[in-house]
Image (tube, rainbow, N blue to C red):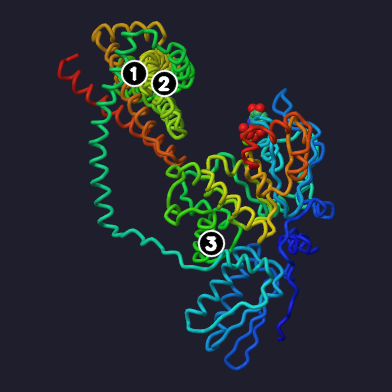
Amino acid sequence: MAETSHSATPTRRPTPQDVNDREVVIRVRGLEVGFGTKTIMKDLDLDVYRGEILGFVGASGTGKSVLTRAILGLVPKRTGTIEVFGEDLDALSPQSRKAIEQRWGVLFQQGALFSSLTVKQNVQVPMREYLSISERLLDELAMLKIEMVGLKPDAADKFPSDLSGGMIKRASLARALALDPEIVFLDEPTSGLDPIGAGEFDDLISTLQQTLGLTVFMVTHDLDSLHSVCDRIAALAEGKIIASGPIDTMLASNHPWLRAYFHGKRARAALA
Amino acid sequence: MAGAIARDPNSFHKQASLPVSNAYDPTAELVRHGDELKATLSGQWTAARSEAVEHEAAALEDAARGAHRVLIDLARIERLDTLGAWVLDRTRHELGGRSQRADFVGAKPEHRILLDEIAYRGFQQLPPPRRSSIIDFLAQVGESVVDAGKDVVRGTSFLGEVVVALLRVIIDPRRFRVASIVHHLEMVGFRGVPIIALISFLVGCIVAQQGIFQLQRFGASTFVVNLVGILTLRELAVLLTSIMVAGRSGSAFTAEIGSMKMREEVDALRVMGLDPVEVLVLPRMIAIVVALPLLTFIAAMAALFGGGLVAWAYGGITPEVYLSRLQQTISQSPSTFMVGLIKAPFMALVIGVIASLEGLAVQGSAESLGRQVTASVVKAIFMVIVVDGLFAMFFAAINY
Ligand SMILES: Nc1ncnc2c1ncn2[C@@H]1O[C@H](COP(=O)(O)OP(=O)(O)OP(=O)(O)O)[C@@H](O)[C@H]1O
Ligand SMILES: [Mg+2]
């Protein structure tokens, strides 16, 4: 066989203009979620494009985690539609829903590692469930993911209760990445990490995005992450998305909360 | 970059269909020129096709036997993820290890980055722990004997801690947690009444029925009243109640304290200068020590009532006769009634201490919580019966 030559696509960060012609992987329309008599969000619309890192900001308690959980189907919604990969999650058969669940990975705010399994076993849970591969490859892949997220190999045989807060975040990212998902949901991945660790985490996320075409939905309060890795930012307040766009849009916004957020003392320090 | 994968119009639909279609299965076309092997890979080398990925890679490795040089052409690979990259790099590495030269050619830039990131390396495996079943078994037996001994010591010293906490609370009554005690009294005592009364009632019926059935043969069926009265008041009521409370409330105590331990709530109490024994254990101990004698009394009454009903219906002993015989029996040995009740608080202490200790022994995992709850119930029931035996010997020795 003749060797095929081929042209290389230069690596390039997406620009806002790209956004219009890109595939929407998560489309939320008219979402309303509430508990009891309390309404957390109403008429919320959100698009997440393929291959982007979306930073999701909002004051504590505005419902960022609740929105994530609603998209994942863990919190019931009152009205609205949620489409993932172009499919309405309500209209799916259990089988196709399972297929979609294999294509996303989730890092919960509290880690949510299985406490009776070691880190390595935790990473292997989804693999054992969905992949039919040899025991050797299973071990190697688990170790690979564990190293990839910056954990030492000796952490592999530790139980979650023996890990530090930052290690829990990393281990649970390793588990979220176990199946090489197309979308990862990260709920405050860098909170509780030291600044250097947080920076490495950001680099890791952006490497994965570039090499695997990963779409990242990242809830974060970390201004550094917002500046350095996020392609687009969406801000949640009063139960709605008040603004979305690249960081420049955010900086230019006149919404009082956004002004306070992006022009506060900490934000200026992060920009400097 | 990402776009190259993202813009591939097929990349989404192929994945969405289940089961995955074969058209995108990873394949390796192998062409041999003398001692050079050229492998042209195509398809999707991803986790979704993990089985085929492993299989194709193994086939490539086999085919490469005897070839000095192996060229792996990646240009036609459509999708590559960490699983695919790992398997490919591992294959290349292993061929290299067999003193063959293996190289990747034509990789797309994003695949190149991925392969560089992944970079196969062996992970050193921890040596599996030494196993010898006989030695393990003997060691386990030894360990459990030592543990049982330690349990007794720990239980006693824990009881001491509880007493100290109690004294502290008595000296400074503001620290008395009335709300908590009342809550646990309701859970242990009040809510336990129906099931304990029902079980005792049924056991009372059964004892009476069996008694009448056996005693009838000697024409002594009225003695069933003595049987039911003494057995219930001395032993049955307190035993049944203790076993039920160990199962109902002991397990609840262990689970409550254990899950607080698991989520560092116990540590949070400690750093606030609050003593977990005083805050968590003492109210439960007080509640169970108060509730168990009361429940025992209710259980005794229910069993006597059940016995009376059966005696009436099955043995023809009217309630008047039943009651007067019962009175006679008890007044002949007035200690009967007290013997059961005296034991109750001790049973409560045993159950409370074991349940609290097991709860505080919970480690970080959900599994450990389950283990301790089981241990708590099993140990508590065992100890209740042992303590009952000790009391029986004691009362016999002092002729009570
Ligand atoms: N299961 C629930 N039942 C009732 N209310 C809930 C529930 N889960 C969340 N809430 C409420 O929803 C609101 C949003 O919570 P959420 O956890 O989404 O906040 P958040 O934006 O993620 O905050 P943070 O940045 O602190 O994580 C809060 O007021 C919370 O009390
Ligand atoms: Mg949250």
Report the mark closest to the observer, 1 or 3: 3
Chain letter of mark 1 equals B
Chain letter of mark 2 equals B
Q: Is residue B221 visible?
A: no
Q: Quadrant of residue A222?
A: top right
Position in image of residue B383 (x %, y %): 29, 29
**Does dot 1 land on a helix, a strand or a loop?**
helix
Report the mark closest to the observer, 2 or 3: 3
Position in image of residue B303 (x %, y %): 40, 17
Asked if the residue under mark 3 is in contact with the one under mark 1, i.e. CB atoms within 8 Å, the reply is no
Chain letter of mark 3 equals A
Q: CA distance from mark 2 to mark 3?
A: 59 Å
Left or right of B168 in this view: B259: right
Q: Are marks 2 and 3 on the same chain?
A: no
| Residue indicated by mark 1 | B232
Say if A41 sits above or below B113 in the image: above
**Does dot 3 land on a helix, a strand or a loop?**
helix
Asked if the residue under mark 2 is in contact with the one under mark 1, i.e. CB atoms within 8 Å, the reply is yes
Q: CA distance from mark 1 to mark 2?
A: 9 Å
Tag shown at residue B200: 2
Image quadrant where one finds the N terminus of chain B: bottom right
Say if A172 sits above or below A264 in the image: below
